[in-house]
Image (cartoon, helix red, strand yellow):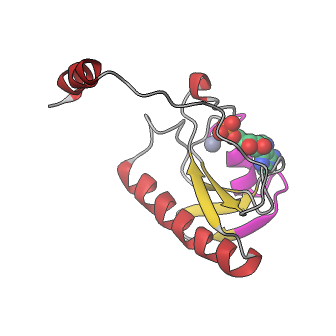
């Protein structure tokens, strides 16, 4: 448990949460500022800061728990789709520094929109990037 980590405190039961799922390694609870109805967070019980820090097994277990939760959101809330989201570091909007996956149920008529307008990239630039990143 990390000092001053609100998700560690939620896992330990020292802070309240609307817990909706749990297994040996993970906990899932409702987000208090939901983007849509049923927006939840899945966290590993063992503290890690984010995707760059998390142990591989904890990542696998958290992903599996998110899959289980997605199925439950579909079954119980009748969502039409699901977004999985992780924010790693403030540049990527991380605000709580205990690894978590957002499991966001999506509804055909919900108001969420992509916050960016993706633009095509030139073929040469794509190839340069590929070169930089391979291996
Ligand atoms: P992120 O910005 O990806 O780090 O997401 C952190 C999320 O945690 C936000 O969606 C917050 O609404 C949510 N959050 C913060 N505090 C709590 C809390 N005490 N219980 C449930 N969700 C929380
Ligand atoms: Zn923590």
Q: Is residue 128 left or right of residue 18?
A: left
Quarter-of-image position of residue 83? bottom right
Q: Which residues are magenta?
A: 1-20
Residue 12 to residue 50: above or below: below
Q: Is residue 25 left or right of residue 69?
A: left
Q: Ligand 1 shows up in which quadrant of the image? A: top right
Residue 33 to residue 19: above or below: above
Residue 33 in sight here: yes
Figure quadrant of the N terminus: top right
Q: Nearer the viewer, residue 130 or 5?
A: 130
15 in the magenta segment? yes
Percent position (x, y) of residue 84?
57, 53
Q: Residue at x 82, y 58 (%)?
A: 17
Q: Nearer the viewer, residue 49 or 78?
A: 78
Q: Residue at x 70, y 43 (%)?
A: 113
Percent position (x, y) of residue 26?
57, 62
Figure quadrant of the C terminus: top left
- How many tags in the picture? 0
Q: Residue at x 83, y 46 (%)?
A: 33
Q: Is residue 87 left or right of residue 29?
A: left
Percent position (x, y) of residue 41?
67, 54
Quarter-of-image position of residue 73? bottom right
Percent position (x, y) of residue 32?
84, 50
Q: Residue at x 72, y 34 (%)?
A: 4
Residue 44 in sight here: no
Q: Residue furthest bottom?
A: 75
Residue 8 to residue 26: above or below: above
7 in the magenta segment? yes
């Amino acid at each position: 448990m990390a000092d001053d980590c609100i998700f560690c405190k939620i896992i330990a039961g020292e802070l309240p949460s609307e817990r909706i799922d749990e297994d040996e390694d993970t906990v899932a609870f409702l987000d208090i500022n939901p983007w849509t109805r049923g927006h939840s967070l899945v966290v590993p019980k063992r503290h890690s800061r984010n995707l760059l820090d998390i142990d591989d097994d904890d990542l696998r277990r958290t992903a599996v728990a998110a899959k289980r939760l997605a199925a439950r959101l579909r079954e119980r809330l009748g969502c039409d789709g699901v977004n999985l989201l992780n924010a790693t570091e403030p540049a990527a909007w991380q605000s709580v520094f205990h690894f978590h996956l957002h499991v966001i149920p999506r509804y055909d008529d919900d108001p969420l929109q992509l916050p960016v307008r993706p633009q095509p990239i030139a073929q040469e630039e794509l190839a340069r990037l590929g070169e930089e990143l391979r291996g």
